[in-house]
Amino acid sequence: MDVAEFDRFADEYLETHAKNIAVSGESPEYFARYKIDEIRRLWTARGRPEPRTILDFGSGIGASIPHLRRAFPDAEIIALDVSRRSLEIAEHRHPGLARFTLYEGSGPPAPDGSVELAFSACVFHHIDAGEHIDLLKGLRLALAPGGALVIFEHNPVNPVTQHIVATCPFDEHAVLIPSGVLRRRLLDAGFGRVEIAYTGFFPAPLAGLRRLEPLMKAVPIGAQYYAFAYA
């Protein structure tokens, strides 16, 4: 998907996304929130110092911004996206919660060594695979010593995910990334260690079983997965 397509879908993103994921029984808000809650849990469990600067790479219309602000109240949040229209909507929805910044699509996504936590939610499957390693190198260089990059992606092994992506208008040109492939690209980009975990096993009617998900992170059939990569 090119920049023009991102701009075209920006105004209808929430409505389209909500219809597309209706099979899960959850709203876009739920999926935005659980990602940040998981990062907060991981950050605390690892005893990492509070990040001073967080980069939301591919922030879109800002779905993650209020959850990042709640989870990391003292951090500066940089919302970075290639779509000017998406950033306009994000800033209108969440004024003052982040620094909304247009990314020209090349070069470092942030000044070297300025970011303690970089985050990306289901962005890389929209980006040509040939650009991944260079982008990941740029994100690694943006991280401060001891910083980390967390990337959430759709799991192409999960049949429900396959259906949702295949029927989503703004995923028309998406190419889903197997977790092992993303892990290799992160290592090739110079990250020292990469952890993969799977999530999103139970739809809303089975929400009572979600308490089991922390025990299932190694089971590679979750609807999504994330890579926790150390600089």
Image (cartoon, grey):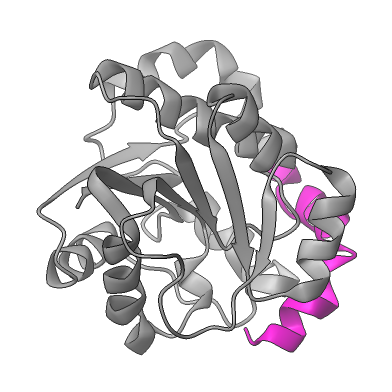
Viewer-proximal residue among 179 and 4 = 4
Residue 120 on image: x %, y %: 48, 55
Q: Where, by quadrant of the figure, is residue 15 drawn?
A: bottom right
From the viewer's perspective, is residue 166 above or below residue 18?
below
Q: Residue at x 33, y 89 (%)?
A: 130
Residue 132 on image: x %, y %: 34, 77
Viewer-proximal residue among 170 and 7 = 7
In this rendering, position of residue 230 left or right of residue 91: left
Does residue 220 appear in this view?
Answer: no
The residue segment tinted magenta is 1-23
Magenta span: predominant SS is helix
In this rendering, position of residue 93 left or right of residue 65: right
From the viewer's perspective, is residue 176 above or below residue 73?
below
Q: Residue at x 66, y 65 (%)?
A: 101
Residue 38 on image: x %, y %: 44, 28
From the viewer's perspective, is residue 226 above or below residue 17?
above
Q: How many marks?
A: 0
Viewport quadrant of the N terminus: bottom right
Does residue 15 appear in this view?
Answer: yes
Residue 202 on image: x %, y %: 51, 28
Viewer-proximal residue among 182 and 65 = 65
Viewer-proximal residue among 74 and 3 = 74
Q: Residue at x 55, y 30 (%)?
A: 34
**Does 9 lie within the magenta span?**
yes
**Does 186 lie within the magenta span?**
no
Q: Residue at x 33, y 72 (%)?
A: 138
